Image: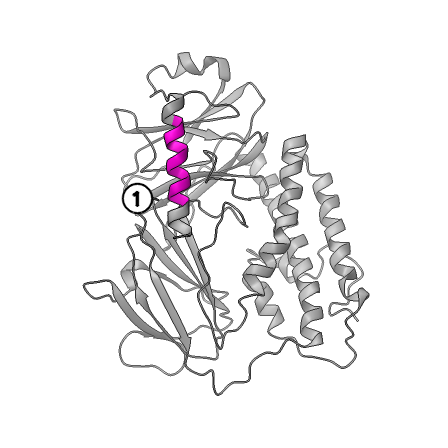
Amino acid sequence: MSWINESDLQATTSLFASAQMPSSALIDKLLREVEDAPEVVLDETTVEIYGQRLVEAARLLDGYPLTSNRVDRAESFHYLLLMTAYAVESAITNHDPLHPMWTAPGQSHLLDWGAASPDGVYRRATIRDDCSYRMWGQLGNAPYLSMDFRQSNPAVTLARSDFDVDSEGNFEFFVGGEPRDGPWLPLQPGTTGIAAREFFDDWRGAKRSRFRIECLDSGTISPSEWNAGRVAACFDVVSDWILEASIRFWMKKSTELAEIALNSFRPELARTETKLPAVTSGLWQLAPDEVLVIEFPGPEADFWGLQLASSLWHTLDYANRFTSINQAQMQPEPNGMCRVVLSHRDPGLYNWLDTMGLECGLMIIRFCGAAKASVPKTRLLKAADVGDELRDARRCSSDERHVQRSNRREGVAHMVCD
């Protein structure tokens, strides 16, 4: 017996298909409501819909015009393969809200959904909206930090300035349950977890925050059990998420973006009135002999970072390739302008973004605490003309490039592994 009774895979009833942002937190939200049933049998039919949805996802990718060449097509199917691991890791392996623990820092250069920032350390903890929790720890040195309460309605985000810390950065607060004296906030209906972001411009000097969490009601509420109904539901919900949230959703986003911001950025910054980073994005599409010059004035920000991703919003390898740049890695012009060259081959310039051979992909820039944030301007050039057009730009020797690459690898290793 399949948990989801649907014969049509065309996204007519899927919660993920109708969600404005179908994050993996929705997987956990659906699975919490599953109860076991005696008629559920685990056998070969349990994975039939899972397989059908993967076939449907592959069919969509086969007809996706933004991944029509050989390199882009390989990246898109590699991404499909990774999404099984992502869905399981992010929504199933850390499922117990009565005994929550913060996940290890996510290695976005290996596994990513939704163009996570290369400068970011992402961690999650699972909670329930009918429980109370104690949170404590010590803040690190990230220029930007936030905690989002996942699936909260209304949305709740804590910024670094919201934490009541002592002289050493230690903090403690409570969430959910009855109001308390001291730092406390209620849990809004629908909350399934907490997602923490820390953005670092100095990767090698990054000091992550230390986070701890405990449920204060773990002895009074019955935990969810891994019964046959729940396991069957996992196959159905995870495959639905892979098809709708990781493939169809981002295909639609990029197709729309290609209509308004091809080789350019959206003309406005989003999220400027929130505690989240201000952001804008666009798509590049470059022939083998073309480059894209990206320019913007120094934003005087606490943090900014520019990155590349595939047209399915999968963050590209930034540990071994030059697919992102931030305010500490950038060499600005003497007049304060920031200028980056996006190209298929190394142009011999210090500020370079590497397409990794992809013909088409996403560009996204984030600003945190910026006094002068603005949408970047772009210019499309022939690769042969870059030297003449940018004759004053700082050059980069092969030895300097080697140092840059070594610094990136060590920075990523320290930021997310140490």
Q: Is residue 374 above or below residue 121?
A: above
Q: Magenta segment, principal secondary structure?
A: helix
Q: Is residue 305 above or below residue 209?
A: above
Instruction: Tell me where the magenta segment starts and ends, as one range.
Output: 401-412
Q: Quadrant of the N terminus?
A: bottom right
Image coords of residue 126 (percent x, y): 49, 69
In this view of the protein, can residue 319 be seen by the observer?
yes
In this view of the protein, can residue 277 be seen by the observer?
no
Q: Is residue 379 left or right of residue 62?
A: left
User: Residue drawn at (80%, 61%), measured in percent from left and top?
Assistant: 7
Image coords of residue 365 (percent x, y): 42, 40
Give whichever of 409, 309 is nearer the camera: 409
Give whichever of 196, 411 is nearer the camera: 411
Find out whether residue 409 is within the magenta segment: yes
Q: Which residue is mark 1?
A: 370
Q: Amino acid at mark 1?
A: Ala
Figure quadrant of residue 77: top right
User: Residue drawn at (24%, 62%), measured in percent from left and top?
Assistant: 169
Answer few, some or many: residues within 10 Å of disc 1's Cα (few below 14, many 20 plus, some between 14 and 19). some
